[in-house]
Image (spheres, coloured by chain):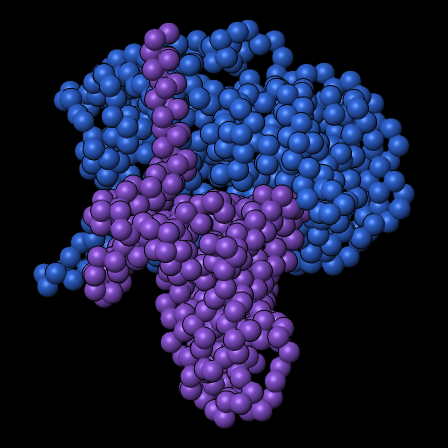
Chain colours: A blue, B purple
Amino acid sequence: MSDEYILEIEGIRKQFPGVLALDDVSLKIRSGKVHALMGENGAGKSTLMKCLFGMYHPDAGRIIFEGKEHHFQNAKHALDTGISMIHQELSNVPKRTVSQNMWLGREPLTRLGLINHRKMQIDTAALMKDLDLDVSPASLMESLSISKQQSCEIAKAVSYNARVVVMDEPTSSLTEKETEHLFKIINDLRSRGVAIIYISHKMSEIFRIADEVSVMRDGKMVGSYMAAELNENSLISLMVGRVTTQRFPTVESRPGEVRLSVKGLTSSSPKSFKDVSFDLRASEILGIGGLVGAQRTELVESIFGLRGLSAGTISINGKEVKIRSSKDAIANGIAMITEDRRKSGIFPLLSITMNTAMAALGGYQTKMGFLKHKAIRAKAKELNESLRTKTPTMGTQIRNLSGGNQQKVIVSRWLMTMPDILIMDEPTRGIDVGAKYEIYTIMADLAKQGKSIIMVSSEMPELIGMSHRIMVLCNGRHTGTLEKAEATQESIMRLAATFS
Amino acid sequence: MGENKALNFQSLRKDFFGKYTNLLTFVVLVLILSALTQGRSMQVDSVRNLLIAESVRAFAALGVGMIIISWGIDLSIGYVVCLTASVAASFAQTAGYSGALYPGVVFPFWVPIVAGIAVGGLFGLFNGLLIAYGKLPPFIATLGSLSLARGLQLIYTKAAVIGSLKDTFKGISQGNVGLVPNLAIYVAVAVAIVWIVLRHTRFGTNIYAVGGNSQAARVSGVNVEMTLVRVYFFAGLLYGIAGVLQASRLGLANALTANGMELDAIAAVTVGGISQTGGVGTVSGMIIGVLIMGIINYGMTYLNIDSYYQLLMKGAIIIGAVYFDMRKHARKL
């Protein structure tokens, strides 16, 4: 049975105005296997999935599920038939309970036609027990961790008797421990004969969990391989279409004088970080590592004035400064690239030019208070050109760019403020492999020019590959700092899990 | 190659229509009305009447247009304008009029103007503070001020008509410069100022930033709260001007003055492409929206269609405009 194809996607073609998004793409999925779907952003993975779930109608091609051709009209239709998708961003109703979410839209009824709450609870509990999940049916969705909410979605898929489950970047917001738990669930589903299409950028996961790997590039299917045939380098070359020898550029700069000195910094929120001290030097890239919940983002956002402090001092070039708002931070030469580009980075409807200029407008005003549009345009263009932002025009709305190019615009925004210190929170999140390398190169160049960089990252290879030193937080405490020479995944992990 | 060209042409055409839909709508409406009335409706006098009638609304539209760009809304417009008109009128009554609110007192020419604008500004400031620092949803904050303004107006005027206004005060909006009504000139100046603010100042850019993504604006060093307070304050000043002009134009103010103006203004800017999603909109859009609503009102009146049906029309237009706006943005986001 396990060698049968349960789902066959054949010769899918999808044309958008001006772009051929999918060109004769085929994908065959076996029951009881984990099939990784890999490719850079823009390779066509999500378009293919949207065609599968009926959100797009392909121009050509067939979808055969359990031997029968299907044309799904929407995700619900696919779900009813037996194909489910776990989205990267969870789509549940936060204010309702687990069981209400589970049976949403198909609530069991009593004979009187009223909702049978008891049955909902019992069925949910049984399902959770069956999947060995520790989730109470009566808890509110919003009270659960992201990982548990995700488990609920998987349980929901199982409750629909899904034979194929698509998971889109399921570990992007999970801790290592939660990831382990997810893998356990995936293994369990696999042993029940469920086929899993697993979309992720994380190489290490692919080689741990996947049986087969299909790679897409530029709207075409490059090929399908047994995971055992591939290694990290060969997989990356398949994805980017060239041989990559290095994932990180050489960071040539040497740290100089102390530029930023933080002493005894304590958050105004009692659950957050406490008594954190560190120095940042000129031309230095300081990595900040830790697990989810280590309060890394809280720390850097507090330094940038976005969150409150209750104790501690911040000194720049030996002089103590008071930073009460982002405006103060910018005035002190600090820049902040936030972790969530969509939520707190881009202005989706504004042009590249305005997105670039937004933090530096104060320096581009006449004495009368009018904006110097010409100078703004020229500077924004120069910066984006120097970072090689790929965009049709500078007037293009930023939402039309890929993640990597959006990130370059955000970096340009901060370079326009002429900062000495750049804080970059997860600078390559949601960016494809090729663009990642470009962002790394930009970081190395900036350090070489004398800028100081703080990089918060959840990706160990990135921390190790790019940082001069790595400072590790655990549960809001500074548990240690590693020099580049002593930094390994193990040594970082040890500090990241030093709960005191 | 040929396909490419065709595509470019197509997208060009789409761009053109996308950009100028509003203007085209206006032109088409004018043509339809001219055809229906064999051109009689489009004589100089009629056009002047149209401009005069829409002028006061234009001030309200400019104000609420800026507010909607900041991702807010203002439901208090009608009664705030009513209050400012009443306050202005009360300081402009003729000395001999025994029923005046301040009988026997003659105020200098500027007092009613400054008083009206000041009251508008205060209400705007109040709304802005509630929304920015009190964190009230704009909908609720301005619903509250709507009732406050209405109450204050009735208390202040004792529910009476404030009439018998001085000719000098009426002259503010009833005069002409050549063929052009004064009111049209005021609107032109206001449009120019709002255009400069939105397009050429940091404050204007910050309004788009706050409306487009307030969190990103905060990270970029924009003082989000202060920007919101300033938007509502600025809009309040415009409502104040609207009130002064309305009182001057009608020669009186009462509890019915400017009734439903929030509906007119919100409808106009919505039709003009100021998106409810925030962060989108232009001054030209606001003004074309006012003109479109104006030509519809005017046309229906000219064609002797009952004013009750005009209300139905307005409601349908708001709903329709927002429906298409939401579809457009839902697809792109």
Q: Is residue B10 above or below residue B149?
A: above
Q: Is residue A116 visible?
A: yes
Q: Residue placed farthest to the front in the image? A: B178
Q: Is residue A277 left or right of residue A340?
A: right
At which x and y percent is residue B154? 44, 84
Q: Is residue B210 left or right of residue A37?
A: right
Q: Is residue A158 left or right of residue B196?
A: left
At which x and y percent is residue B22? 37, 42
Q: Is residue A185 visible?
A: no
At which x and y percent is residue A72? 20, 30
Identify which residue is drawn at 50% across, 60% down: B176
Q: Nearer the viewer, residue B44 or A465?
A: B44
Identify which residue is drawn at 30% across, 57% down: B298
Identify which residue is drawn at 79% across, 34% down: A420
Q: Residue placed farthest to the left in the image? A: A111
Quadrant for the N terminus of chain B, please.
Answer: top left
The answer to which quarter of the image holds residue A459 is top right
The answer to which quarter of the image holds residue A162 is top left
Quadrant for the C terminus of chain B, please.
Answer: top left
Q: Is residue A249 above or below residue B266?
A: above
Q: Nearer the viewer, residue A189 or B158?
A: B158
Identify which residue is drawn at 61% across, 59% down: B230
Q: Nearer the viewer, residue A189 or A286?
A: A286
Q: Nearer the viewer, residue A464 or B254?
A: B254
